[in-house]
Image: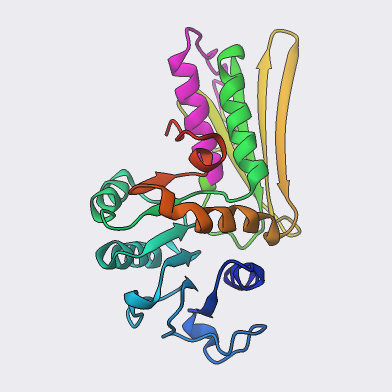
Amino acid sequence: MGGEVCRAVEAAEDLLLVAGVDPSVEGERLGDINHITSAPAADVVAVGAVDQLNPDDIDVVIDFTHLNVSRTVLDWCGANGVHAVVGTTGFSAEDLDAFRAAFVNSNAIIAPNFAIGAVMMMRMAELAAPFFETAEVIEFHHNAKRDAPSGTAMMTAQRIEAAKQASDSEWDTDPTEQEVVAGARGGKVGGVGVHGVRMHGMVAHQEVIFGTTGETLTIRHDSIHRNSFMPGVLLATRRIGEQHGLTLGLDVLLFGEATSS
């Protein structure tokens, strides 16, 4: 993902990418970027380590790493007044509270999915929730993904549940009395079932299935290449200066309002 981000930023005429930070590939060439290094200076940096960066040379850090690394990146950005665009998922409520306190002189956007279609899928699912009695979220990812369910699936389920709770309707109870195989019914976020599939050949896909009397509604999104996330990454990078503090998801950029989560 880091290489895809570097290529997207490099190709954007209004953004300047000086380097990408990933010590595992230090010294490699990427397009017109002289080196991928662990100690660059840039207006926009795709980053995997931050301890040697000069904050005076950076406007935005784009982070697609792992949870523990991303916490360090966000802490550094907040402390040094650098904007952060983050695609890492799995942060706790305590993490988010800490980021809200840290980002006073700069802003952060954390999104579980930067694909515009995925954001639309979550919004449509949120709108549908009050009108159906059952809902299941099924996410499909490549077999190298480490977490399950995905951050997108969790945010989708949370937003569906919040929309349902805000309405005058209720979910039907799950009739399952015995799971022949443990976990066959997936996990639950309130009344919403959540299932994760890991498989060769997949990139990132999700279905939300709603059911009511005599009908079902399926909302599906497919990312068939990692470049599907880049329009959202570039949108967040260009507009992060307009936000204030911590923003979760791309809704505020696309619809002018924050998510309900």
Can residue 46 be spotted in the picture? no
Total number of numbered labels?
A: 0
Of 91 and 176, nearer the camera is: 91
The span picked out in magenta is: 152-178
Give the side of residue 55 with respect to residue 249, left or right: left
- The image shows residue 134 at horizontal and vertical percentages of 60, 18
Looking at the image, can residue 183 be seen?
Answer: yes
From the viewer's side, name the closer residue of 237 and 38: 237
102 is higher (above) or lower (below) than 216: below
> Position of 249 compared to 176: left or right?
left
Specify the farthest residue to the front.
Answer: 14
Q: Relative to residue 99, is residue 181 depicted above or below?
A: above
Q: Residue 193: where, in percent of width, then height?
A: 56, 30
Is residue 154 inside the magenta stretch? yes
Q: Which residue is drawn at 60% across and 52% down?
A: 232
- Which image quarter: residue 129? top right
Viewport quadrant of the N terminus:
bottom right
Residue drawn 55% across the image and 12% down it: 172
Q: Residue at x 33, y 76 (%)?
A: 56
